Amino acid sequence: MEHKKLFIIMVGLPARGKSTIASKLRDNLVRVGIRTRIFNNGDLRRKLFLKDTSHSGFYDPNNKEGVALREKIAITNIQQANDYIADKGQVAILDATNVSLKRRKKTTSLLKDYTLLFIECINNHKEILEASIQRKIKLPEFKHLKRKEAIQTFKERIQYYQSIYRPLKDEKNFVKLDSFNNLILGEEIQDDLPYYDRIRDFLVTDTVKNLFLIRHGETYFNLEDRIGGDSPLTENGKAQATAIAAYFRNKKIPFIFTSKKKRCLQTAEPIKRLQQNSTVVPLLEFNEIDAGVCECMSYEEIREKMSHVYSARKADKYNYIYPEGEGYVSMKERVETGIRKALYLSTDSENIMIIGHRAVNRMILSHFLYRRKEDVPYVYIPQDKFYHIVTSQDKKLFQLKKY
Ligand code: F6P
């Protein structure tokens, strides 16, 4: 048994985040000097047989030719991974669905001299799955199909894999991962696996290369100190948005996540305009705190007309919930879901941007940077600066920058 070498075998239905985790894990290991390479069956298939392997029938377990071809691709990759490990490689990641017992048994027998770690990615979040499928069908292999046909055939492909899917259970070393929440759902480690302490910790850590957390530009409500509502940007707010756009024009921002409010969408507009290829993704989860009966009032009006709200909030701002609205305490869960969606959808992007609001950005910042609850509602969120956040297993960076 070779102890310093490890095979990682990804497991899971298509569009469950396997390749993103595999590439982030590879980068993470390579950064600390562990020689790691990914062997991806999909890439090999596209390289060798792009034509005719995108339609769902190719994945039908009863299609003998399809099964044989996919088996051949899998074995070629295992052999290449084996050669790599037998030579200088330390970790080889087999990135494929590997959902059937038959495939996993075959892999195990071909690699019997080494320790294997199976990582099963599970994500049944419907909305996220739909969004991931939308992204998948942009791959060149679906170019000849209309959008609807591509979605249909990809969903059928998932169904075929589903029909032969056997979750991990009897393998010697495995982790079942909720790949949306970075949460370990099950774990069985019988061997002394090299690098496992590092890998396990990585799996539960948010990895973000560069997150730019921006607050929308100035609104008419801001000028009057009014809260909530759906006020548009002032001329000054529009100028701030243009300045942000100019600042980021040389960085590639594939996704700009915003709330569904005008002020965030208007701030995103000029930024997207100066980008080559960027999608604005409005998420309800990033809408500003709902001030309920106080929506659209100014802080002064609240103090005068609703002094009970004013004093109760002042006494415990984090836990206070506006009548018919929200409090920091009750918006935490939805904002965290928004963060998870943004991270998952942006896969391994170099840059991610979120344009949010004062309270929302406080929650987002506090997610990455520990804050005591009672301090969260007071985190500094200016409109003329943004937070640059880098977070990985080995590094945490927070920087308030002027644009
Ligand atoms: O004033 C702008 C705003 O985003 C309001 O819409 C929101 O109610 C408020 O800030 C949140 O800040 P605080 O919790 O300090 O009142």
Image (cartoon, grey):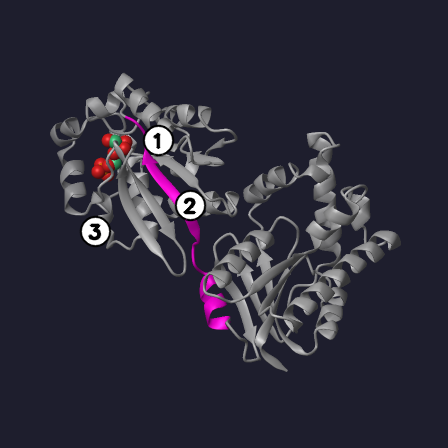
Q: Which region of the structure is painted magenta? A: 196-217
Q: Is residue 75 left or right of residue 174?
A: right
Residue at x 70%, y 55% (from the top left corner): 41
Which residue is identified by label 3?
374
Residue at x 50%, y 62% (from the top left corner): 30
Judging depth in this view, the residue of 128 and 49 nearest the camera is 49
User: On residue 247, which mark appears?
Assistant: 1
- Inspect the image, locate mark 3, and give the three-letter code of the amino acid beneath it: Glu
- Of tags 3 and 1, the one toward the viewer is 1
Q: Position of residue 217 (x, y in %)?
A: 30, 27
Q: Is residue 283 magenta?
A: no
Q: Quick one: label 3, few (<14), some, or many (20+) residues within 10 Å?
A: few
Which residue is identified by label 2?
339
Identify the image quadrant of the N terminus. bottom right
- Inspect the image, locate mark 2, and give the three-letter code of the amino acid beneath it: Ile
Q: Quick one: label 2, few (<14), some, or many (20+) residues within 10 Å?
A: many
